[in-house]
Image: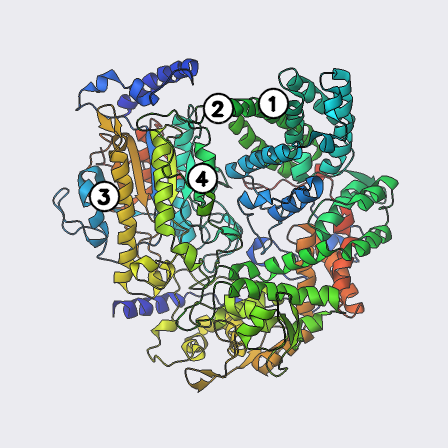
Amino acid sequence: MRRELKHLASLVVVGLATASCAQTAAPGSAGQPAAGAGGGGTAAVPDPTNSDCQALSPGPSPLRRLTRFEYNNTVADLLGDSSAPANRFPPEEQSLGFDNDANVLRVPAVLAEGYVTAADDLSQVALANLASFTGCNPADFVGNRPAETACVKALVTRFGERAFRRPVTVDEQTRFQELFETARARFEFRDALDTVLQTMLLAPQFLYRVENGSPVPAAPGVEAVDEWGRASRLSYFLWGSMPDAALFDAARAGTLQTSAQVRAQAERMFQDPRTRTVVGHFHDYWLGLLKIDGQGKDPALFPDYTAQIGPLLRRQTEAFAEYLYFDSPGDLTTLLTAPFTLMNGPLAKYFGVSGPTGDAFVRVELDPTRYAGVVTQPSILSWNATANRTHPILRGKFVREKLLCSSLPSPPNNIIDQRDSVTDPNATERERLEAHRQDPSCAGCHVLMDPLGFALENFDASGRWRDLEGGKPVNVSGELTGTDADGAFVGPVQLASQLARSKAVETCLVTEWSRFAIGRGETAQDACGITKLSQRFQSSGRSLRELVLSMTETDAFLYRTPPSAQVAISGSTP
Amino acid sequence: MRPGRYAVRTGSKIRRRALLGGALGASLALPWLEVMGDLKRASAQAPVEPKRFVTFFVPGGYYDGFFWPEGESETDFKLPYILEPLAPHRDKLLLLDGIEVKTAADGFGHPHARGMSALLTGLPLPAGPFDFFIGGPAGFPNGASLDHVIGAQIGATNKFKTLEFGVLWPTYENGALPTNIISYSAPGQPAPPMSDPYEAYLRIFTDLGGSPEQLAAAELRKAKKHLVLEATSREFGAIRPLVGVNDQQRLDEHLAQLKDLESRLDLSGGTLSATCHKPDPAPTPADRINYGTGGAVGELGNGGLDQGVSARMPAIGKQMMDMLVLSLACDITRVATLAWTDAASRAYFPWLGLNQNHHYYQHFGSAQDHATIFNWYMQQLAYFVGQLAAIPEGDHTLLDSTVILFGSEISEPTHHGRTRVPRMLLGGGKTFNLGRRLKFNDASHNDLLVSIQNSFGITANQFGDPKYTTGPLSGLV
C-alpha cells in the first residue's frame, strides 16, 4: 500500500517531464551527422567556415593512449608476450560507448602502478634469454664495456624504433645510453639493461601515440601526420596493435604520403585476421555486447540459460558481423535484414536448431518471417531485458541510440518504473506501458522508444522467439516516427526493413565507425568528413568493407590540428 | 571543534616524522605506533588522536522505519533492525540522523551518482560525458575527495597515502563512472577501487616479510625502479612540448602519479610484528574475480553481476576487510575506503535467500527484503569494527585511533532521497563523543566532512561546495 502511494507521488513528478523530445527527435534525414548522447558528439551543425567542404578539416587531434586491448596486442607483437598484462589494468572510462575516446581516458594511480608492474614483468620475461633479446651474445663480452655499450646502442636503435613506432631520436639514444651507463655502474649487465627496457615500456612514446606532423602549405592550421604516425594510425585502427614490418618499411620508404598509398596498405591489412578481431571489438562496444556476459536470467523461467549462454550470444553477434565484413559481400541492408545468423554447436542446441556442431560458428538460415538482421540478434534482445522479463523501453532506446544515433533527453529526476503499478498480474509488458501513451508528459519521449520495443516483443527476455505472452498472443504492432523512414509496422521484420530504408541509420553507422576510428566524438569540423564518408558508403552499395577502408582516407585520419592550436578545455577535466 | 588541541598535536607529528625519516627500515621491530606511543597517553583518560580515516560505503539507502532509532534521547534509544548488528559496538558509534546531501539538488547525473560522488567530495557533478538514465549526462566531481585530502595531510610516511578497496564492482567493464567511484585523487581524477582480492594482496603486501633472498631481490628491484622512474620522468619532460595544452595536462597527471610512486618506493611496506602480518590465509590466484567482460549495467533492473560472482561477496568482503585492517595495523596506510559495490548495485544476495539484485529491492521488492540486505551489510561493519577493536595499540586499540565514516548514497531508495541519509561515525576514541544518536534538521553533509577534516588537523571551515558548507557540525565532540 505504501508503495502505491509512492507511485502516485511519482506521477505528479512526471508532470514535470520535458516535452523536449519533439525537438530533439531523431537526426535529420539529409545525411546530417547525429548528435551523440552524452555530450561527446555535437556535429549536428556543420562548420560554417567550410560550407563547400573544400578545405582540409581534420578536427581536434587529442593525444591517444593505448587501451587495454591495444596494450595487450602491442606487447604481443613487440615482445611475443601473450600474457595480456593489461587485463590487470583498470577498465577505460567510456564515452559514446567506446573504450578509446581520447578525451575521457585518465591515468589513476592504479593504472600508473599497473604500467610499472607490467613493464617490470615484461622486461624480466624478455631478458630471460639475453642473447635472443639483444641480438648480441652478452656471454661473449660482458665486462668488456665498449662491447656492452655497442650492444645496447644497437638494441636501443632497433627495439626503440618498434617500441616508439618511429626511429629513436639522437637525444633519446643519448638518454638511454646514459641510463644504461648509470645503471651499469651499480648493477650487472642484465639489470642495467632491465632499467632501459622498463623505461622504454613506461615512456609516453610507448604508452601514448605521440605524433609528428608537417604544415600543409595550402591549408593553414592543418598538418599532415608524418608517415610513422600514419603507419600507427593504420595499425591501431585496423589491428588494435603496433605496425608490422611492411608498414614500418612503407613509412621509412616514404610511401604513405598519398591517401591512395594509405588506402592500399589498409586493403592489405584488411586481409589479416587481426582486423576481424577489431571488427568484433567495434561491435562489442558499439552494440554494448560486453554487458551481456555477466547478465544472468531467472533460472526458474530460463533454466537452460546457463552461464555459458551470455558469452556465446555475444560471440554470435561478433561472428555475424565478421561474416558480413569478411566472408560475404556484406552491406548495411544485410546487416539490418539478414534472415540468417551464425551459430556453433552449443548455441544451436540452445535454440533447438539442427546443423552446427562443434565450437566453430557457421551460417544458419532462419525463418525470414521472424528474423531480420541485427535487431533480432538474441544478444541485443537479451541484454536489453531484465532477468525475468522483456523491456520494450530499453529495446526501443537501443534502436534509437545505437542504430539511429539519436540523443534522447533524460527523464525527469525521481521518475520510477511504473510497470509494476499495473495491478493485473497477467498484464502484458505492452499493457503495463500504456500509461506512457495516456500521459502526454511521458508520451513526448516514449512514443520514440516504446513502439520500437513493442515490435520486438516476439522475443522473450532471453532472446528466444515467443508467440504468446502470459497466454495471450503478443501484439507487435508499432510505428516509427521522427525519422526519414516513418510508418507503421507489425513485428520485427517490418521494423528492420523500415530501418534499412533510413538514411539516418546509414549515417549513424558511418558516425559510429568514425568515432571508433579517430578516438573521439564528432565535432562540427567533422561534418564534411562524415558527409563524404556517407556519400562514399552509398555509392559503394553500402558495402561494410568499403566503409571501414574509407575511414583511412578522411582528413581526420591523415591530417591533424597541430598541438599548438589545441584549444584548452576549461575546467579540470581535459 | 577545538582547534588549539590539534595545533598542539601537529607539532608532535612533525617530530615523529623527522625521527622516522632517520630510522626508517633500520630497526623498527614493532609497528612504530607502539614504539612511538605518546607517553602522555599513559592515562587511559587522555584523548586519543585520530590517526586513521576509513570510509565504509554501502549502497542503497533504507526504507522509512528501518534505520533510525525512534524517540528523542541522545543516549537512551533502541537500535532498529538494520542497525542491530552494531549493538556490541554501541558505545563506539555516533548516529547522525538528519544529514542532507544538499549538493544532490544541483548539477547533473543520476541521483545515485550524485549521492555517491558527494559522499567524500561534497560536490555536485558537472555536465560531462557519462550518460545516465535520468539526471543528465555528467562528469566527475571537480575536487579531490576527503580521504585523499586527509591522506595528503597524514600519510606522508606511509607506503600508500590512501588505499581504495572495493568488494564487487558490477559496472567494472564500463570503467570509472560517477556511480561507481567515491574517491578522487584530484579534481576530475577518479581513484578506482581494488576489486580483486588477489591483485589487492599483491599490491599491498608484497613488501611485507619474506626470506632474506626475497628481501635482497626486492631491494635490487627497488633500486632499479628508482632509476627507471627517474628516467621515465625525463621522457615525459621530453615529450611534453610536443603535445597540446590539454594533452600536457594529461601527461602531467600521469607523471604526477609516477612521481608519487617513486617518492614511496623506500617507505616501509610494513614490519612483521604481533599485530602486523600477511593476510592469513593469503588470497591466491584462485580468488581472482574474473570480471573479464562481465559486469552488466543498464537501467532499472537491466543487467546484473554474474550471480556466481555475487555469491562470493561474503568471502571477498571478508578478504578485503581483513586486508584493510592489516594495512592499518602494519601502518602501510592510514587512510582507506571500502566500497561494497556500485551505487544502484546489481549485486545478488543468494545467501540471504533473495533471488533478485539489490537495485531491484530498491524499487520493487519488499521493504523487509531490502532491509535484510542492509542488515547484512551492518553485520559486516560490525565485523570490521570488531577486528579493529581487537588490535591493541598501546593503552587503547586500533579502533580508538581510527575515524570511520559510514555512509550510503541515498536515503529512501524508491525516490532516491537525499535527506536523512545514512550517516554515522565510529571509533575515533575521544575525538568524537560516542555512544550517542544526534538529530539534525537537514544539516549539510558537507559540514560533516568539515568536522572530519578538522579532527585530522585540517582547520579549514569548508569542504566541497561552499554553497552548502557552514562549518563543522555542532555537538559531535
Q: Are marks 1 and 4 on the same chain?
A: yes
Instruction: Read off the residue under disc 4.
Output: B200
Residue type for callout 2: Leu
- Residue B413 visible? The answer is no
Tell me the tag on residue B227.
1
Residue A385 placement (x, y as % from top left) = 48, 68
Which SS class for mark 2? helix
Closer to the camera in the image, A271 or B359: A271
Instruction: Read off the residue under disc 3.
Output: B95
Q: Residues within 10 Å of mark 3 (few under 14, many from 20)?
A: many
Residue B430 placement (x, y as % from top left) = 22, 29
Q: Residue furthest front?
A: A140
Subunit of label 4: B
Subunit of label 1: B
Q: Are marks 3 and 2 on the same chain?
A: yes
Q: Are marks 2 and 1 on the same chain?
A: yes
The N terminus of chain A appears in which quarter of the rendering? Answer: bottom left
Instruction: Give the CA separation, mark 1 to mark 4.
Output: 25 Å
Which SS class for mark 3? strand
Instruction: Read off the residue under disc 2.
Output: B215
Q: Work out whether mark 4 precedes mark 2 in sequence or the reverse, and give the earlier one.
A: 4
Q: Residue at x 24, y 36 (%)?
A: B474
- Residue B179 visible? The answer is yes
Closer to the camera in the image, B405 or A561: B405
Instruction: Give the CA separation, mark 4 to mark 3.
Output: 31 Å
Q: Are marks 4 and 3 on the same chain?
A: yes
Q: Work out whether mark 4 precedes mark 3 in sequence or the reverse, and give the earlier one.
A: 3
Instruction: Give the CA separation, mark 1 to mark 3.
Output: 50 Å
Residue type for callout 1: Leu
Q: Work out whether mark 3 precedes mark 2 in sequence or the reverse, and give the earlier one.
A: 3
Tell me the tag on residue B97.
none
